[in-house]
Amino acid sequence: MDYLVDGLKGWAEKINRNRFIHEGKIKKGAQIAGFVENHLKELDGLRQSVPVERLCVTSSVAPEGSRFKINFDAAINNHRKESCSGLVIRNAKTEVICSKTVINSNILSVFAAEAVPCFQALQLGLQLDLREVEIKGDSRTVIRKL
């Protein structure tokens, strides 16, 4: 649950920062906290209907000429030196082909927390034999290093 709260806080802070930069609007801390709290309540309601473990539901080989997009993101728990990677594969019609969540241990920096899911996205694309792939994440540092 700590990963989820930390991830939502980070997400809310990014949204708030981007709104300020691009639109000149800013939310107060109480508004951001309310935003996070509402999302947590919504996610609590989903627990009964979402399976605990999700596996890729796809064939082991993608159709020739198919274009896919793999999105990745991470949440980090600095105190435990752990992170959680989220991966989603969508086809050209934006349908979800596969999703995967991985808990990572021994994560010593924020850069590592963002780099690991990028690497996992590459591995997943190779495992599924995807030929044309666009990999997207929100870590500018990881993207620059690649």
Image (spheres, grey):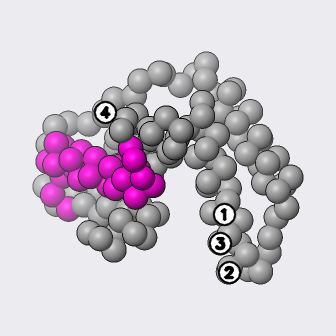
Identify the residue under disc 2: 22
Horizontal and vertical percent position of residue 106: 36, 38
Q: In which quarter of the image is the N terminus?
A: top right
Label 3 near label 2: C-beta < 8 Å?
A: yes
Label 4, label 2: how far apart the Cα atoms are: 38 Å
Estimate the x, y position of residue 60 in percent, counting from the top left: 16, 37
From what the image shows, is residue 30 above or below residue 83?
Answer: below
Sequence-earlier tag: 1 or 2: 1
Q: What residue would you read off at disc 1?
A: 15
21 to the left or right of 26: left
- Give the amino acid at mark 1: Ile
For the point 80% across and 70% down, the residue is 26
Residue at 20% across, 62% down? 132
Q: Mark 3 points at which residue?
A: 18
- Sequence-first disc among 4 and 1: 1
Classify residue 12 by image quadrant. bottom right
Q: What element carries label 1?
A: helix
Q: Marks 3 and 4, Cα distance to the nearest angstrom? A: 34 Å
Left or right: 11 in relation to 96: right
Q: Badge 1: few (under 14), some or many (20 or more) residues near its Cα, within 10 Å? A: some
Quarter the C terminus occupies: bottom left
Q: Which of 38 and 6 is in front in this view?
A: 6
Mark 3 near mark 4, Cβ–Cβ under 8 Å?
Answer: no
Is residue 29 located in the magenta-colored stretch of the structure?
A: no
**What's the distance in space between the residues labelled 4 and 1, CA to CA?**
31 Å
Can you give x and y, in whole percent of width and height, for residue 125 in the image? 22, 50
Residue at image coords 68%, 80% = 22
Marks 2 and 3 sit apart, C-alpha to C-alpha, by 6 Å
How crowded pointer 4 is (Cα within 10 Å; few <14, some 14-19, many 20+) is rated as few
> What span is in magenta?
107-132
In terms of secondary structure, where does tag 3 sit? helix
